[in-house]
Amino acid sequence: MGMTIAEKILAAHAGKERVSPKEIVDAKIDYVMVNDVTGLPAFEVFEEFGTKPILEKSVLIQDHYVPNKDVASAEQAKSMREFAKRFGIPNHFDVGRGGVCHQIMIEEGFSAPGRLIVGADSHTCSYGALGALSTGIGSSEAASAMATGELWFRVPETQKFVVDGELGKHVMGKDIILHIIGDIGVSGSLYRSMEFYGSAIESLHLSDRITISNMAIEAGAKCGIIPPDDAVFDYLKNRVIGEYSPVYADEDAEYEDTFEYAASEIVPVVATPHLPENVTPASEIDVQIDQAYLGSCTNGRIEDLRAAAAVFKGASKSVHPDVRMIVVPASKSVFEQAMREGLIGIFMDADAYVSGPTCGACLGGYMGVLAEGERCISSTNRNFIGRMGHPNSEVYLANPAVVAASAITGRITDPEDLLEG
Amino acid sequence: MEKYIKGRVWRFSENVDTDQIIPAIYLVTGDRQELAKHAFENVRPDFARDVKEGDIIVAGPNFGSGSSREHAPRALLGAGIKCVVAPSFARIFYRNSINIGLPLVECDVDAADGDVLAIDFEDGKIVNTNTSAGYTFPSLPDFLVDLLDVGLIENTKRKLMRTG
């Protein structure tokens, strides 16, 4: 019997010929990442080991609460700076030099096909879009991985998701993954590896694929892997650190389940409060909003900003007077590209507020926290109770074009309806 | 780790995410006691006030979903929670809990707030002492039993000793 992509990557990193689902293995990791929120507890645990971190494998990224939201978060960020300095860790991305951790892990060439990458952030699964097995871990084990270069893994069962056909206008990676989560539920892939196939997936640019892998965790998955192709190899040219070798599933690999979807049936959707599985076509609900948020590791890339800017340009309209729109490019480099392309100007002309990269608002930290009773249409990944602020506020998840269209009308809107009307 | 515990139940429903367990605005410390002050603040304000050392959480499927924050099991340990019982757990929460010494039991138990559960980890048995209903659960793989027992920190130290 052959192996799936996750099985092959784990076997290779555990020094084994083959592994089987449910087996627990010790595997060598290629990189371990922490952010400013998960970093501090990791550094405290690291002190216990009385050793030095493996410099070339450790990546420290300041993104959640930087620029510092308060004194406590300032102390937290400071602890990362000091840890990096003390041990001479070269890969420390501070304010003004990086951005949202997952975007940096991809832009800076840490992520590549066949790699095993862990990060103390649940959306570490994003790099599956490049054919890596990447997964979220906790702070203590991040410290352990920095010290030993290894970690224990339970080999996951793999589920296959096939999306075939041509995608409609304004349908993005976000809609594909929300459509799938709407079908299988928020624990539909619990402990599992998701593998994505089909002509619709192959037709996507890398950014949309990252959105899909990014939200694998919202179905409970360990990882969400897309077999790498030229879109990935081209992206990695002059970017990737070191060598890499792509890993593909065997033809006789064993899948626990196979789910098939027709791309033509996927439309721009929103996930209504308070679970990502509550998926409804954007055109079918009528909900007034107070805030529109465009950004995050899920949808804060240049392609996302282009999609939103195109809606503003196409409609020749500004943000509705009763709505504040917040645009947060996911990294310095996305911000710079958006400036070069004139996208920042389009947003500002439309009365949107544009800030430098931070995770802040996505998790209700700062830079866009919601008051009681307020509703936000958001390009982020979670709509849990109180996720972006007050426990009685609401988050509706959607793709960047739906966020922009909704910002214009003040109500959740399918961009197609906006442009027609 | 204790082989047998008895504790009062806090009942939660399905899909309890880590934002509910500890809201992100408090992720500015790793201290268990400090985090425990805000556990379940948005969804169950009485929890932090009334929780007692030795209490047990019984929940529906997919407990601990969402963020990777180890602050969630740390907050529960800080609050004195001795075990979480649920039909299934989100995987990062599961790892974090085992790594820092919070036992989790995968079992679908019928229990209400205030019921008293007796859990025998060695025999894999649970009894709800209020309803007398009994349940069994599969034991953890040896590797995880050992990890839960010694903790990830000690486990890592041993590994470092071995590899020099």
Image (cartoon, rainbow, N blue to C red):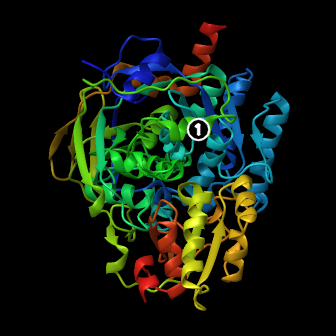
- Residue position for label 1: A234
The residue at 30%/53% (across/down) is A165
The residue at 81%/47% (across/down) is A78
In this view, the residue in front, A234 or A220, is A234
Quarter holding the C terminus of chain A is: bottom left
In this view, the residue in front, A46 or A9, is A9
What x and y, as percent, mark residue B19? Answer: 50, 58
In this view, the residue in front, B82 or A334, is A334
Query: Is residue B133 left or right of A4 when viewed as pictured?
Result: left
Query: Is residue B142 left or right of A133 when viewed as pictured?
Result: left
What x and y, as percent, mark residue B154? Answer: 57, 22
- Judge the density around disc 1: few (<14), some (14-19), many (≥20) Cα neighbours within 10 Å: few
Q: Residue furthest bottom?
A: A321
Q: Quadrant of residue A370?
A: bottom right
Q: Quadrant of residue A329?
A: bottom right
Residue B68 appears in the rendering: no
Quarter holding the N terminus of chain A is: top left
**Which chain is indicated by disc 1?**
A
The residue at 63%/37% (across/down) is A33
State the SS at label 1: helix
What x and y, as percent, mark residue A356? Answer: 74, 63
Q: How many marks?
A: 1
The amino acid type of the residue labelled 1 equals: Asp
What x and y, as percent, mark residue B14? Answer: 31, 57
Residue A46 appears in the rendering: yes
